[in-house]
Image (cartoon, rainbow, N blue to C red):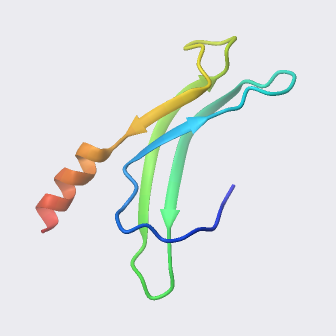
């Protein structure tokens, strides 16, 4: 899926993927999430989050959310660039 919104001032380094758990057989498996921010006359920012988890109450880890953070990796990279 994709969405539109205001550009963020800093790259995304963490995400919380959540299912509402509604519907019959509502659990789903997520391999990864890739977030790309683009804007006219701006540089592109891309972040890749490995999830490899069910979002379901009937499959381990029996949760409807998956939090992933690459913030330490992003901060280390930014300090090397600056």
Q: Based on the displayed image, in which of its 4 quarters is residue 70 positioned? A: top left
Give coordinates of residue 44: x percent, y percent: 43, 72
Seen as rendered, the residue at the extreme bottom is 41
Q: Is residue 9 left or right of residue 81?
A: right
Is residue 9 shown above or below 29?
below
Give coordinates of residue 81: x percent, y percent: 15, 66
The N terminus appears in which quarter of the rendering? Answer: bottom right
Q: Residue at x 40, y 55 (%)?
A: 12
Q: Is residue 20 left or right of residue 72?
A: right
Give coordinates of residue 65: x percent, y percent: 57, 28
Is residue 29 shown above or below 36?
above
Q: In front here: 51 or 24?
A: 24
Q: Is residue 23 left or right of residue 21?
A: right
Is residue 70 shown above or below 27?
below
Is residue 74 shown above or below 62?
below
Give coordinates of residue 66: x percent, y percent: 52, 30
Q: Residue at x 56, y 38 (%)?
A: 17
The C terminus appears in which quarter of the rendering? Answer: bottom left
Q: Residue at x 47, y 43 (%)?
A: 15
């Amino acid at each position: 899926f994709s969405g539109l919104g205001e550009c963020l001032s800093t790259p995304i380094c963490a995400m919380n993927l959540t299912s509402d758990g509604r519907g019959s057989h509502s659990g789903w498996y997520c391999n990864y999430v890739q977030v790309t921010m683009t804007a006219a006359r701006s540089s592109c920012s891309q972040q890749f989050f490995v999830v490899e988890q069910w979002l379901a109450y009937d499959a381990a880890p029996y949760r409807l959310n998956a939090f992933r953070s690459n913030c330490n990796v992003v901060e280390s990279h930014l300090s090397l660039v600056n």
